[in-house]
Every structure is written in structure tokens, then in C-alpha cells.
Image (cartoon, helix red, strand yellow):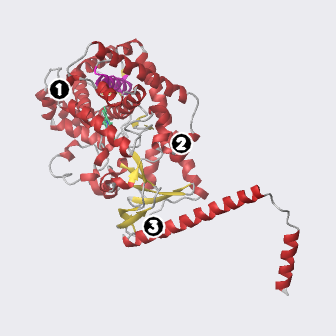
Amino acid sequence: MSASLSFHGAGVFLTSFTPVRPSTFTGLLLITSICVYLYARNAIKHHHDVEFGKRMGCKPSAAKLVYHWPLALDIMKDGFRAGREKKLLAFFTEHFNQLSPTAEVKILGGIGYVTQDPQNIQALLSTQFQDFHLGPRSLAMKAMIGDGIFTQDGTAWKHSREVLRRQFMKMQYQNLKGFRKHLETLMERLHTSSGVTDLQPMFYRLTLDTTIAMILGQPVGSFKHGIGDLFSKAFDQASLVTGTRVRLGDMYFLYCPRGFIKACETIRRYTYQFATEALQREVESPVESDKTSFISELHRDNQDLQLVRDQVLNVLVAGRDTTAATLSYAFHLILRNPTVLETLRCEIVTVVGHEKDISRAHIQQMPYLHNVLQGTLRLYPPVPINTRFCRKTTALPVGGGPDGRSPLLVREGMPVAYSVYHMQRRQDLYGPDPLAFRPERWDGSELASIGWGYLPFNGGPRLCLGKDFGLMLASCGIVRIIQEFPGIKLAPGEVLEEPGTERQHLTLTLSNAQGCKVVLK
Ligand code: HEM
């Protein structure tokens, strides 16, 4: 009876059915087919991934970010608040301290991992480099720096890397005379300032000038007329917004505050102008082929001025803030540790004396200075957190199972964030005093086997190309300031807080939100 009723019911249903127009019907059929196809494809993919995981011995992560509101909105809310208070990395520290070095993070329904494990970071950046890519970073950064080494993947990146690598190699053999003029300009500025001086903005200006001069092959004359300040301001504004866009991943487009596009246009316009002027100068007074500038080599490579401009901007983004932040944090730490300052001053007096022309040979004879920089980059790596996206389903070496020692399945499309900042503060890697600024820890055997546990310059095929440039400039900057102002000290009222508890500014890179306030003597 129920069958007939239902059959009857079906008849009523059918007779009362309003015939749909073929186009609507075809549309519905198409949408349904697509949904079924996508569902089936995902199910098959999921099955293959699970099988792959079993073969690789993967186990699910037992460490999971704990949240209390749906979609982890409480974490998002607290994270935004910490960002506003300039304490975002300290906020992450609180959470990471409760988890294993590799943990699962589920936010807004999306799943990813966050790791501070050297083995997993080595896999991401080196041994399994092919399995990962930069994901939406290129789109998030496009408005500011267009298309270049920092945003490219695959063959485009390989090509950029090769062209830029040749240029950086050429520079490695040069002496450090190129820095001299810029360092002396900085000294002049410092001598004219009185009372409390904030070194940090001056370091940003120094690294902007040196990086531009390195790229263009000559200092930019027009920078003297206030254009440098305009450019710096636009650059800061664009970096701040771009940093947030990168952290938003696929949803980068949701964040485009007023003034952002204008700031991007300003820096692109000026860079284009500097680039064309520099190239024009080389046409008017040609130099020997082994002395051609960075920029002419870029131009010879692609002949497209817009691409040259983008590549220049990419190198500027990579080079300016990282080195300036290193200098600023170095003084932050040195001046809070008087014995470090004293040891460093003795080394400078012994090796360099009053010589203003600092050479590579001088720097190579200053192991303590090297250790000071190692220690600074350990506590404050300028690129503290970074992300890679899985290109094809793979397994990370560790992070799975209750003890986190089994391999971990990472499915295609998943983000894996890695925090060098937190890894370099781990007690199990750096001993009982991981937050202490103790340059001596780099002597002897204490950290001889640290390997991928120390990674301020990245590793693997995307290792920083400007490592030598940045370290040499930072070394010369520290030496010149301590030579010139042997009585330099912290500004009155500066707090001696534990590293990481001070306010921090997180754009594309990390810097000190409190600046670096000193009294120069
Ligand atoms: C202390 C100073 C510096 C630090 C700590 C540093 C750190 C880094 C890091 C962590 C990356 C990898 C970013 C990623 O793959 O997501 C990187 C890449 C890069 N850096 Fe540096 N950097 C410094 C200075 C410089 C300077 C001065 C320049 C240029 C003048 C430079 C040029 C580059 C370039 C071109 C890349 C891209 C490499 C590639 O993707 O193949 N860096 N740097």
C-alpha cells in the first residue's frame, strides 16, 4: 500500500511538475554534473592521499591548536588584538609553547600546519623543495613589487635567480668601499643629532641608499632633494599593508586600505625613473664589460624596463628592511649587555683602530663581531615566519603521531608555516638560557651541530642572495658607530625587558616598534 501511495504520489508530483525550459534544465544538469564530478574527484584524491600516507608511515598530528569558538574565530580575534598591540609573535609564542614543534592549525575551516622543527623546515626548503611553492604570495605582493625573484616560482624564478646570482657573485669579490660614502653620511647625521637619537630610521635610510646604489651602480643624485624621504615613506606604507596581505593568504584582496595603491604607484614610478636614468648614464659613458652595473645586466637580460623595475623593487624589498632591522636589533641587544659592548669595543680597537675604511680583511679578523651578529639574527631573524604551500601531496619527516616523531601527511594545497623565530628560541636546541644574548655561545662546540636549527637567511635553493652584502654592511655599520661614539649608551628610561616581550612591528619583516633610542657620546 505504501508503494502504491508513493507511486500515486509520484504521479501527482509528475503531473503537477511545471516543465522547465531546456536551457534551465541543461544548466541545472551541468551544475549537478560539475558538483558530482568535483565531489568524486575529491573523494578519489582523498583516497589516494590516504593510501600514500599509509605507505609513508604517516600518522595524524596529535598537536592541534586549541580554539573555543567556531572556525577558530576566538584565535583570529585575539591575533588581531595582539597585532594591534604589536605583540603578535609573543601571542604565537604563548600558543606554540603549549604544542609540539609541529602542530595542526584549523582556522576558518582551512587546515594547515605550523612547524618550528629543523627537520621539517629542511624538507620544506631543501630536500622536498619541489613539493612546495610560494602559493598566493605573488598575488598579495604584486601591487607593490610586481613580478620578480621574490614572488616567482618554477622556471621564471630559476631564471631570475641565475641572473641575480651572477651579479651577487661579482659583488662578493669587491671590497667594501661602496659602503664608505653612505656610512660617512650616517655619521654626519648622527653627529648633528643631540639628546636622544633613534638609530632605527637612520638605519633604514642607510640600507635604502646602499641597496639602491648597489643595484644602480651609482648613488642616486635626486635622493638628496627629499625624494628619498618621500620614497621611504611610500615604501614603509606599502610594506606594512603588503605584509598583512601576505599573511591573509588567498584572502589578500580583502585588505586594501586607503593610500595603499597610491603608495605602490609612488615607489614604482620612482624606481622606474631611477632605473631609466641609470641606464641612460651608462649609454652615455660606457664602462668595461666586467664593470657593468647590476641594472644593465638586468636590462641586457630582458630588455623590458617594467620588468627591470620590478626586479629592482624585489631586491629592494629583500635588502632594505632586513639589514636595517638587523642593525637596529644588534644595538638594542648590545646596549642592554654592557659586557658585550666592552668586548666588542676592545676587538674593534685592536683590529681596526681609528681606520674609517673598513675592509673585508678587518671583518674576517673580528670573530666576536661575527658572534654578535649571529646572536642578533638568532633572537630577531628579520623574516621571522614564512609559509610554503604544498604543490603535490607529500609527507614531512616528523610531526605525526602522539609523540610527533612519525611522518606527517601534507595534502596538495595545504599551507605549512615555519617559524624560524620560535625555532631559534627553543630550549632543547639552544640550552637552558635560550633568551639570553650571549655571543660566546657561538664559540667552541656548543652549537656545532645546530644545522637547520639556525636559519635567518633561509636555506636550500632559495637561500638569501644578499647574505654577504647584508652581513658586511651590518658589520661596517656597527664598527663605525662604536668607533665614532665609544660612549654610546641606552637612552634614559629604556626598559631592560626579556627579548621578545617588547613591542614589535611585523610588516614583510620584523622590526622594533619602540625604535632604537640611544644617547651618542
Ligand atoms: C641580515 C640581512 C638579511 C637577512 C636576514 C635576509 C634573509 C632572507 C630570507 C629569510 C630570505 C628567504 C625569503 C623566502 O624565501 O621567503 C631571503 C631571500 C632573499 N634575499 Fe635576503 N636577507 C638579508 C639581506 C639581503 C640583502 C641585503 C639583499 C640584497 C641586497 C637580499 C636579497 C635577497 C634575495 C634576492 C632573496 C630571494 C632569493 C630567492 O628567492 O631565490 N637579502 N633573504
> Magenta segment range?
197-217
Residue 224, percent across and down?
Answer: 37, 13
Residue 248, percent across and down?
Answer: 52, 45
In terms of depth relative to the viewer, which is nearer, 238 or 174?
174
| Residue highlighted by disc 1 | 175
Height in image: 516 above or below 193? below
Asked whether 201 falls inside the magenta stretch, the response is yes
| Residue highlighted by disc 2 | 252
Q: Residues within 10 Å of mark 3 (few under 14, many from 20)?
A: some
Residue 239 visible at all: yes
- Quadrant holding the C terminus: top left
Amino acid bearing label 3:
Asp
Quarter of the view holding residue 309: top left
Quarter of the view holding residue 332: top left
Q: What secondary structure is marked by label 3?
A: helix
Q: What secondary structure is marked by label 1?
A: loop
Amino acid bearing label 2:
Tyr
Quarter of the view holding residue 108: bottom right
> Image point 42% across, 32% down: which residue?
514
Mark closer to the chain start, 1 or 2:
1
- Quadrant holding the N terminus: bottom right
Report how far apart the C-alphas of labels 3 and 2 lie in the structure.
Answer: 28 Å
